[in-house]
């Protein structure tokens, strides 16, 4: 009988201990638009293995619904503990008080230092008055060129410090026309919207100034006038019209354009090219070097009941182990300078690219720029950019209407008028 009592007592103690262990496990919710990568690159699984006291409940939200869904969740107090916010969303979440400052966490971190991040991180911190998010990785915009077409024409490849004049001269030399028909374009049309803002920024417009205000004017006019002239001269391909809007066929990938401006993520697409050698270079410099950064920011929900656990997750994701998994899985570079140099993101095909220092060079001057503005505004302005190229609007009207649209959406205090 005594043995039975002792056994029962031990059993109850074991059960109580097990329950205590279960209840001691912290559960945090984490949302993202991308599915988690499979092993061995599943960074959530890697974190849980190193932190058995924390369980991460992953929530995938479709990319088309992501921004609005997170905003709705924040307004109803149901947002996940770990937020990976797009640039414009981060700015709004900061203004609404929905995310926590990371300043004190960074000061206490043995893993992370602010001076180890690309310059744009500190610039954003200064704009927002505090550090509210850390880039889970980043992408930017660069130039691509077909080495075979350059070689065939006996033209030297563009260098890292090439200028807009260099670009125009190369594009003209590499355009081949016969009987009024273009057989080879000097440069493909602009397909990705960010390029419009990056090239306008290269001509001197701030796009988003140091006070967070929309700022476009003379630089945009000069760029558009020169781009329209190149298009009319059949040096740059014209955008194509479809029933769904303005798009551009990928003439570069087809070997029909000697150059193209596009996102850095296209390196993982072009790696499969077999027909010609190609490489990358920073966007050409006009009045300055400029390119746009694209990312998502790890942030802490200000209403989370497990803030320290959330920081441990973010700190792991930004560590070398976490960044190596993320960079490799998604083919995007780390915003940490020390890890960017290690090149975990590189995906090289048989024909290119080779000039990977292009990404590091671009990271030195790239800014968040237009991505800090409401997408509805920037998408709408891009329609007018294309209209100018197609001769449907004057360049002056495009810029004037862009400023008017910005004032209507942002308010006069958040728009610079020349």
Image (spheres, rainbow, N blue to C red):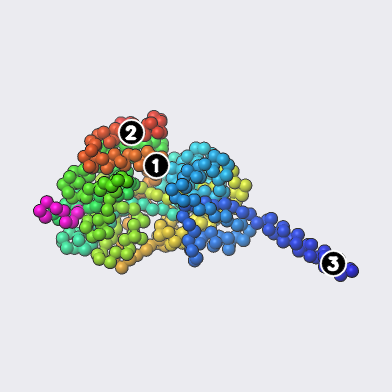
Q: Is residue 150 inside the magenta stretch?
A: no
- The local crowd at label 2, few if under 14, some if 14 to 19, many if 20 or more residues have their Cα within 10 Å, is many
Asked which secondary structure carries label 1, the reply is: helix
Q: Residues within 10 Å of mark 3 (few under 14, many from 20)?
A: few
Sequence-wise first label, 1 or 2: 1
Q: Earlier in the sequence, mark 3 or mark 2?
A: 3
Camera-side residue of 82 and 210:
82
Which residue does the numbered mark 2 point to in the structure image?
Answer: 403
Residue in the picture at 52% in, 41% down: 72
Quadrant containing the C terminus is: top left
Upstream in sequence: badge 3 or badge 1: 3
Tell me what residue is drawn at x 25 percent, y 48 percent: 240
Q: Disc number at residue 6?
A: 3
388 left or right, relative to 37: left
Q: Position of residue 404 (x, y in %)?
A: 34, 31
Q: Position of residue 346 (x, y in %)?
A: 38, 62
Q: Which residue position is annotated with label 1? A: 375
Q: Nearer the viewer, residue 49 or 312?
A: 49
Q: CA distance from mark 3 to mark 1?
A: 68 Å
Q: Is residue 82 rendered to the left or right of residue 377?
A: right
Query: Percent x, y for residue 189?
Result: 25, 50
Q: Which residues are magenta?
A: 178-186
């Amino acid at each position: 009988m005594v043995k039975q009592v002792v056994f029962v007592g031990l059993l109850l103690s074991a059960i109580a201990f097990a329950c205590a262990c279960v209840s001691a496990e912290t559960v945090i919710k984490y949302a993202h638009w991308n599915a988690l990568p499979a092993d061995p690159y599943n960074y959530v699984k890697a974190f849980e293995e190193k932190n058995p006291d924390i369980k991460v409940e992953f929530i995938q939200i479709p990319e088309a619904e992501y921004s609005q869904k997170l905003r709705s969740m924040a307004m109803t107090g149901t947002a996940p503990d770990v937020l990976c916010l797009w640039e414009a969303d981060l700015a709004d979440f900061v203004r609404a008080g929905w995310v926590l400052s990371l300043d004190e966490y960074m000061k206490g971190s043995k893993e992370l230092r602010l001076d180890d991040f690309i310059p744009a991180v500190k610039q954003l911190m200064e704009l927002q008055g505090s550090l509210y998010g850390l880039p889970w990785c980043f992408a930017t915009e660069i130039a691509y060129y077909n080495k075979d077409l350059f070689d065939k024409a006996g033209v030297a490849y563009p260098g890292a410090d090439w200028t807009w004049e260099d670009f125009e001269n190369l594009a003209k030399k590499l355009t081949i026309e016969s009987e009024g028909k273009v057989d080879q374009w000097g440069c493909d049309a602009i397909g990705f919207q960010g390029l419009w803002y990056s090239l306008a920024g290269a001509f001197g417009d701030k796009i988003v100034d140091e006070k967070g205000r929309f700022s476009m004017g003379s630089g945009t006019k000069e760029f558009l006038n020169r781009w329209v002239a190149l298009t009319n001269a059949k040096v740059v391909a014209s955008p194509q019209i479809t029933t769904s809007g303005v798009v551009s066929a990928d003439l570069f990938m087809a070997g029909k354009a000697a150059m193209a401006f596009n996102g850095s993520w296209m390196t993982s697409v072009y790696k499969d090219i077999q027909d010609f050698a190609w490489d990358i270079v920073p966007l050409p410099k006009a009045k300055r070097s400029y390119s746009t950064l694209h990312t998502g920011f790890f942030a802490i929900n200000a209403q989370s009941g497990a803030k320290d656990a959330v920081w441990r997750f973010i700190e792991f994701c930004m560590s070398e182990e976490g960044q190596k998994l993320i960079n490799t899985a998604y083919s995007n570079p780390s915003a940490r300078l020390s890890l960017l140099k290690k090149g975990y993101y590189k995906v090289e095909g048989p024909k290119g690219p080779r000039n990977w220092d292009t990404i590091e060079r671009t990271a030195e001057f790239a800014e968040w720029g237009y991505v800090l503005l409401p997408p509805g505004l920037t998408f709408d302005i891009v329609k007018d950019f294309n209209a100018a190229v197609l001769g449907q609007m004057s360049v002056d009207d495009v810029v004037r209407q862009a400023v008017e649209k910005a004032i209507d959406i942002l308010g006069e205090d958040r728009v610079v008028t020349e």
